[in-house]
């Protein structure tokens, strides 16, 4: 049965960057419904027409994956402007949620701590894979 919109697909995958470095792989089979918005639309498109047992390798360009890297999304804030529910100190690489100061109901922004000084925190609101072409090696295990 070929994969179409609405198919429940179970697969195993490996994800590599442009240099071939393994960035992620499924420890267990992953299942999702094509067209449900659970995964990247371009990833879903690469699956259409494939069947259980197929192995396929494809590359998503940054704009098809996690977007282009935007340097303007790197910014600094004073440490005293950040509120935390944790009594643990901030660490480089940590992800934190930011909320707009106007109190609006907009979804929080996820940002990553890039650098710390005594007074300032440098944050990056880009996805960690932004700007990267990603190559997926998949094996389709089941199509329902």
Image: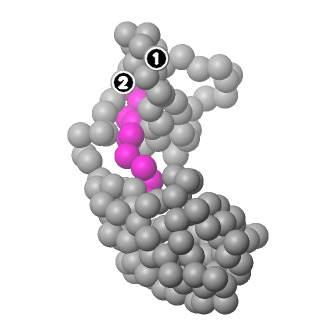
Q: Residue at x 40, y 18 (%)?
A: 100
Residue 88 screen position, x and y as percent? 66, 28
Q: Is residue 117 visible?
A: no
Residue drawn 58% across the image and 89% down it: 55
> Label 2 belongs to which residue?
77
Mark 2 neighbour class, 10 Å CA radius: few under 14, some 14 to 19, many 20 or more: few
Q: Is residue 80 left or right of residue 75?
A: right
Locate residue 35, reporting x and y percent. Answer: 52, 58
Residue drawn at point x = 43 percent, y = 81 percent: 58
Residue numbers of the magenta segment: 119-129
* Placement of 108 over or under 32, stated as above or below: above
Q: Residue furthest left?
A: 72
User: Could you tell me residue 99's position as x and y percent?
Assistant: 46, 21
Rounded to the nearest whole Å, what is the CA distance between mark 2 and mark 1?
A: 21 Å
Looking at the rendered image, the quarter that the C terminus falls into is: bottom right
Answer whether residue 125 is magenta in the image: yes
Question: 116 or 9, which is in the foreground?
Answer: 9
Residue at x 31%, y 39% (from the top left corner): 74
Is residue 69 something one can see in this rendering? yes
Residue under label 1, please give it: 105
């Amino acid at each position: 049965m070929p994969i179409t919109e609405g198919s429940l697909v179970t697969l195993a995958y490996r994800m590599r960057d442009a240099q071939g470095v393994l960035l992620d792989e499924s420890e267990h089979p992953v299942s999702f419904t094509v067209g449900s918005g659970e995964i990247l639309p371009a990833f879903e498109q690469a699956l259409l027409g494939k069947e259980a047992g197929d192995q396929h390798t494809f590359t998503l360009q940054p704009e098809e994956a996690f977007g282009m890297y935007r340097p303007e999304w790197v910014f600094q804030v004073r440490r005293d402007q950040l509120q935390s529910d944790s009594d643990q100190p901030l660490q480089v690489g940590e992800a934190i949620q930011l909320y707009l100061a106007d109190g609006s109901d907009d979804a929080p922004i996820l940002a990553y701590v890039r650098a710390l000084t005594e007074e300032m925190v440098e944050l990056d609101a880009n996805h960690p894979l932004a700007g990267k072409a990603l190559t997926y090696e998949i094996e389709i295990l089941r199509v329902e």
